[in-house]
Amino acid sequence: MKMFRVAALAMFGVALVFSTAFAAGPGMKGSCGWGMGTPYNRMYNPNSVVSFSGEVAKVEMVENIKGMKGMGPGIHMMVKGDDPCSMAPIHLGPAWYIENQDTEINVGDKVTVTGSKVEMGGEDVIIAKEVKKGGETLMLRDDAGNPYWAGWRRK
């Protein structure tokens, strides 16, 4: 009887692992270029962190990130600053992660973005660490720049 319980528990464990892997869905498998050690995430520099406030002028899903091969779709936005000539391109993160957060960012929202200002594809962009909107905060990275969406891989 004891052997039966051990075998049953082992089979349950295997079933649980496989069902969890399949439940993640196609958008959640692999890093699609968004993982911890990828070239994109290595660009984040804690020494170049800036804050930028303004109104969201555009939110879009981008299939190809300039200069980055093998990246899955990401969510980017353009934020118009107080100066009419200032517009900042902001990279938020992988589409599957952003779309599953409670905080939604929409055109017209007043936001403050904190993140690493880097050059990518010949233009300055901000790789966001967090986006504050009213009393809400969309958390994307820790202080060292490690993306929260990759946290499951470190466990």
Image (cartoon, grey):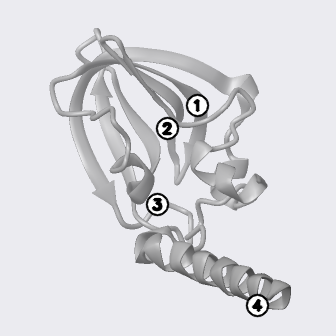
Sequence order check: which comes first, mark 3 or mark 2?
Answer: 3
Task: Indicate which label's residue lies in the foreground, 4 or 1.
Answer: 4
Task: Indicate which label's residue lies in the foreground, 2 or 4.
Answer: 4
Q: Determine the CA span between mark 3 and mark 2.
A: 11 Å
Q: Look at the picture and state if 89 lies above or below 28.
A: above
Under circle 2, the secondary element is: strand
For residue 117, the mark is 1
Q: Horizontal and vertical percent for residue 71?
A: 52, 68
Sequence order check: which comes first, mark 4 or mark 1?
Answer: 4
Can you tell which quarter of the image residue 85 is in? top left
Q: Which residue is mark 2?
A: 125
Mark 1 residue crowding within 10 angstroms, few (<14) / some (14–19) / many (20+): many
Q: Horizontal and vertical percent for residue 115?
A: 56, 28
Under mark 3, the amino acid is Ile
Instruction: Tell which of 46 and 83 is nearer to you.
Output: 46
Under mark 4, the amino acid is Phe
Q: Horizontal and vertical percent for residue 40?
A: 63, 55
Sequence order check: which comes first, mark 2 or mark 1?
Answer: 1
Sequence order check: which comes first, mark 3 or mark 4?
Answer: 4
Sequence order check: which comes first, mark 2 or mark 4?
Answer: 4
Q: Horizontal and vertical percent for residue 18?
A: 58, 82
Can you tell which quarter of the image residue 143 is in? top right
Sequence order check: which comes first, mark 3 or mark 1?
Answer: 3
Q: Determine the CA span between mark 4 and mark 1.
A: 59 Å
